[in-house]
Image: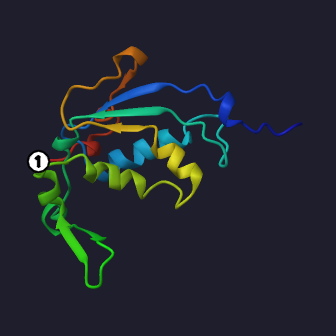
Amino acid sequence: MKTFSAKTHEADRKWIVVDAEGAVVGRLASFIAMRLRGKHRPDFTPNADVGDHVVVINADKVVFTGNKLRDKVYYHHTGYAGGIKEATAARILGGRFPERVLEKAVLRMLPKESPLARAQFGKLRVYAGAEHPHEAQSPEVVDFKGRNRKNVGAA
């Protein structure tokens, strides 16, 4: 038998919409990363970009379990000496770009620092509100919260 190896340009990609309202961040990010990589497909190939396009709405209404909303800290460096900055998850969710919490969670679940990871992450669109401009692609709505009762967190 011959081993089938999928090619990036031959991939049949779908568009899916996930409503993140009330969803647990880590579980949702894991699901999204799996769909972006294409690991749900029978023709998954680790070195090819065969995943779906994912549109996430209501990203500002995600929830954390336990004390993570208060205790989880995101760090970044300005590039200057002593320029390390930190922000808690609660501060980011209440700030100007609340969708960055989910974007960072997904980005950290993809392969590290590679052109493949950048291509896969480029297929993710995250919106804080319920509106998105991708109706022309006729995306399929995926009921993430209905898959498992643990996917929905207590706010």
**Residue occupying the far right of the picture:** 1
Image coordinates for residue 101, horizontal then vertical, percent: 26, 53
**Residue occupying the far bottom of the picture:** 81
Q: Residue at 60% across / 36% down in the picture? A: 50
Q: Residue at 56% across / 39% down in the picture? A: 38
Q: In this rendering, would 13 be left or right of 26?
A: right
Q: Quadrant of residue 17?
A: top left
Image coordinates for residue 31, horizontal then vertical, percent: 41, 43
Q: Secondary structure at mark 1?
A: loop
Q: Amino acid at mark 1?
A: Ala
Q: Nearer the viewer, residue 65 or 8?
A: 8
> Within 10 angstroms of label 1, few (less than 14), some, or many (20 or more) residues?
few
Q: Residue at 78% across / 36% down in the picture? A: 4
Q: How many marks?
A: 1
Image coordinates for residue 56, horizontal then vertical, percent: 31, 35
Q: How is the image coloured?
A: rainbow
Q: Which residue is mark 1?
A: 155
**Looking at the image, residue 78 lies above or below residue 150:** below
Quadrant where the image shows the N terminus: top right
Q: In this rendering, would 90 be left or right of 100?
A: left
Q: Nearer the viewer, residue 97 or 65?
A: 97
Q: Residue at 58% across / 49% down in the picture? A: 116
Q: Quadrant of residue 132?
A: top left
Image coordinates for residue 29, horizontal then vertical, percent: 36, 48
**Looking at the image, residue 13 lies above or below residue 1:** above
